[in-house]
Structures are given as C-alpha cells and as structure tokens.
C-alpha cells in the first residue's frame, strides 16, 4: 500500500515538471518571435548602396527627367466638403394672399421670371364685393371731403356751427382711414385701386413674383382651392449661388476672408470651379463640429443648382518650399522615397545609377509635393522628376536576378 502511494506522488511530480518545462519553452519561443518581428520592423527598407541601374538608351527611352531639387511656391490646403447654396434674401416662397381657386397658372418649373411677373390667377366670390365696397367707400369719402371743406369755410367765417364742423371733420377722417385700409388690401391682392376707380372690376387676383429668379417648384394645380398663406411657388435667384463649405475645428484657424478655393461637384464629372471666401462663420455647427465658410464662385455655370454637393480645397497661403511632382515619389513600407541620379561610365558606356533616399512629405498642390530632406544633398545632386514606380520595379527585378 505504501509503495502505491509513493508511486502516485512521484508520477504527479514528473507531470508537473514536464508542464512547467513546456510553458517555459513556449514563453521563450514567443520572446524569440517578437524579437525577430521587431528586428524586421527596424530593418532598412533598402539596403545601403542599393540602386536601380539603367543604360543611357533605356534612361532616354523612358523619358526620365533629372535636375537639381527645385524650390516652388505651394499653398497650404484645407480640404472641406459642403454644398451650393443661395442666400435667404434670394429665395422666395410665394403664398396665396386670400383663399381662392386656382384659375390659371402662367409658369412651369425652370422658367425664368422677373420681379412682379404674374405667376397665376386666383378667383373668389368675395373678390367683386371687396372692389364694390371700395368704390362705395371712396365715393362717400369724396362727398365728405367736399362737405368738410364747406363746413370748415362756414366755421371760419363765423356763420357755421362749430359742432357740425367737428362732426363732419370726424366722419371725413374716419372714412379716409377706411379708404386707405381698402387700398392697402387691394395692393396686397395686386389689384390697382386707380383702375377700379375708373370702372374696371377684377374677376381674378394675380399672384406675382416678389423676386427675379427661376421657378424651382410649382405646388398647385388648376382648379385647386388654396387657403390664405398656402405655398404656391418656390423661386430661387441662381445669380447669387455660392459655395457653402464646412471647415472642421482643427483647421478653422487657417481659414480667412479673401482666400482662394477650388472645388468639384460630386454629380458633375471633371467639374473644376474656383472662388474666393467672402464670409467665415462665427459659430460651430454640431455633428460634425464645423464652421460654415461662404465663397463667391468666379464663373457661375448654368448647371449649378442649389443643394449640389461639393468637394473643396481652401488655399491657406503660399510659401517657397522644395518640391517634386507626385510621379517622383514612391512609398515603400509606409515611407516616402525619392531618387538621386548619378551618371558614370561603365565599360566605356554611360550608365545611370538611381538611388532611393527617404524623405518626408509636406503640403500638396496641383500635382506637386513639398519634400523635406532628412539629410542635406550634395550641391551638385540631381533628383529624378518622374517614373519612380518604374525605378522601384527595376530594383526589384535586380534583387530577383541576384537571388537566383
């Protein structure tokens, strides 16, 4: 019995030691693998002295251009999205002044209209009654005006009653106010009071445009009854269309009035338009937290419509920087590189050595990229202006041939 217990104890001890050993081995393997990965991450993307080698014939056939690293004036750029808008004073909703039936519609969507142009006519049974009441009240005012002048003259000559004069004056002033009320009502209905006084009676009320612009929406139909203040038409003056961009909080300090912008329309391919900022908002919108920037468009094309979505770039100021075309820069391993070109003789023939060097990129504008050198170049250094991707391909081919 004792020997059985001892055997069990020894077996458990051996299993425990084996498990501990296996765990230690796994830990060591993990450590070694991490060290290897860190070593790979820190390893140079290109080996020292690695370069692309081209014969003069191939160099020329590829049209590779080399020159000293140039200085170019580039603008800082803030990217911003938004849409085309029209200021509120150049948009109008035309409503019915009085309730009535639509008897005529004179425009369709897209029509250009001038301020005061008739858009539609409304009919209402009470319309003739309003005009008749005005004529009666106006004629009564004419009579009282003459009576007032007569009583005033008698009163001043001390032959008339002061009480009668005051009563006549009160009636005259009261009816004058009543006439003015009717005339104001007629003006709102776009009806000429002077024509009514000449005997013309309007059967329909004209609905007119308060601004010049384009009919954006027609919201009524023939014969439809519209209550007072019912929207009938929407008009917009596209002559005052502008770019409304949203600039995020992190960029707003770079933006100011007078800066130039360029933008494209999402719905119109190859649309490249420009403008100038005339207003910078002073309040943040939420979700996203951004400020409205308004820019006048340099050339207002006919296809510009309020509500179109735009992608814009704001130029925040020019500065002289060293720069190269985008085609001269290649990214490998998440790092940007350019090529230094050196011409030499190989077996009596001209050969070009094109060596990559790591740089940092700055601002980008119109296909040019600011280049920030990590180390200064030699005074006579020549840099490559194009075909960076091809040169990387040549280097990879060279590596493959060497490995075989």
Image: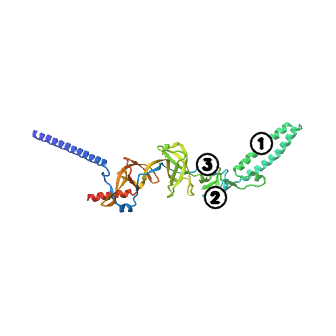
Q: Earlier in the sequence, mark 3 or mark 2?
A: 3
Between discs 1 and 2, the one toward the N terminus: 2
- Residue pointed to by mark 1: 174
Tell me which numbered mark, 1 or 3, is placed earlier along the sequence.
Answer: 3
Q: Quadrant of residue 103?
A: bottom right
Can residue 263 be seen here? The reply is: yes
Quadrant where the C terminus is found in the figure: bottom left
Screen quadrant of the N terminus: top left
* Type of colouring: rainbow
Lateral position of residue 332 relative to residue 103, left or right: left
Q: Position of residue 327 (x, y in %)?
A: 41, 56
Residue at (37%, 57%) from the top-left corner? Answer: 389
Question: Is the residue under label 2 in contact with that under label 3 (CB below 8 Å)?
Answer: no
Crowdedness near tag 3: few (<14), some (14–19) or many (≥20) residues, C-alpha within 10 Å: few
- Cα distance in 3D space between marks 1 and 2: 42 Å
Q: Nearer the viewer, mark 1 or mark 3?
A: 3
Q: In percent of the image, x 81 and y 47: which residue is there?
A: 142
Q: What's the CA distance linking mark 3 and mark 2? A: 22 Å
Which mark is in front, 3 or 2? 3
Residue positioned 14% across, 40% down in the render: 9
């Amino acid at each position: 019995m004792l020997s059985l217990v001892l055997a069990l104890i020894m077996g458990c001890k051996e299993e425990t030691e084996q498990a501990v050993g296996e765990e230690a081995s796994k830990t060591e393997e993990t450590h070694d693998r991490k060290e290897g990965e860190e070593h790979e991450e820190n390893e140079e993307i290109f080996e020292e002295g690695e370069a692309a080698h081209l014969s003069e014939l191939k160099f020329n056939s590829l049209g590779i251009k080399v020159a000293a690293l140039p200085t170019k004036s580039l603008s800082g750029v803030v990217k911003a999205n938004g849409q085309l808008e029209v200021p509120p004073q150049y948009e109008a909703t035309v409503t019915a002044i009085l309730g009535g039936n639509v008897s005529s519609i004179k425009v369709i969507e897209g029509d250009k209209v001038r301020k005061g142009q008739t858009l539609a006519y409304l009919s209402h049974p009470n319309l003739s009654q309003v005009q008749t009441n005005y004529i009666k009240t106006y004629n009564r005012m004419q009579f009282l005006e003459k009576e007032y002048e007569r009583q005033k003259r008698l009163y001043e000559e001390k032959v008339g009653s002061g009480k009668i004069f005051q009563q006549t004056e009160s009636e005259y002033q009261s009816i004058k106010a009543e006439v003015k009320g009717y005339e104001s009502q007629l003006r709102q209905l776009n009806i000429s009071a002077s024509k009514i006084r000449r005997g013309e009676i309007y059967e329909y009320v004209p609905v007119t445009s308060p601004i010049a612009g384009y009919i954006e929406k027609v919201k009524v139909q023939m014969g439809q009854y519209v209550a007072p203040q019912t929207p009938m038409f929407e008009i917009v003056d596209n002559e005052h269309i502008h770019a409304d961009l949203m600039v995020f909080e992190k960029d707003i300090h770079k933006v100011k009035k007078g800066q130039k912008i360029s933008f494209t329309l999402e719905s119109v391919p190859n649309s490249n338009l420009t403008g100038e900022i005339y207003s910078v908002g002073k309040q943040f919108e939420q979700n996203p937290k951004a400020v409205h920037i308004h820019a006048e468009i340099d050339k207002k094309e006919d296809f510009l419509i309020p509500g179109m979505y735009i992608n814009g770039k704001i130029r925040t100021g020019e500065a002289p920087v060293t720069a190269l075309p985008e085609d001269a820069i290649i990214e490998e391993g998440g790092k940007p590189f350019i090529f230094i070109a050196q011409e030499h003789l190989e077996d009596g023939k001209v050969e070009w050595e094109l060596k990559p060097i790591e740089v940092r990129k700055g601002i980008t504008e119109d296909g040019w990229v600011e280049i920030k050198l990590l180390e200064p170049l030699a005074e006579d250094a020549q840099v490559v202006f194009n075909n960076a991707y091809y040169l990387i391909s040549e280097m990879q081919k060279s590596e493959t041939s060497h490995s075989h």
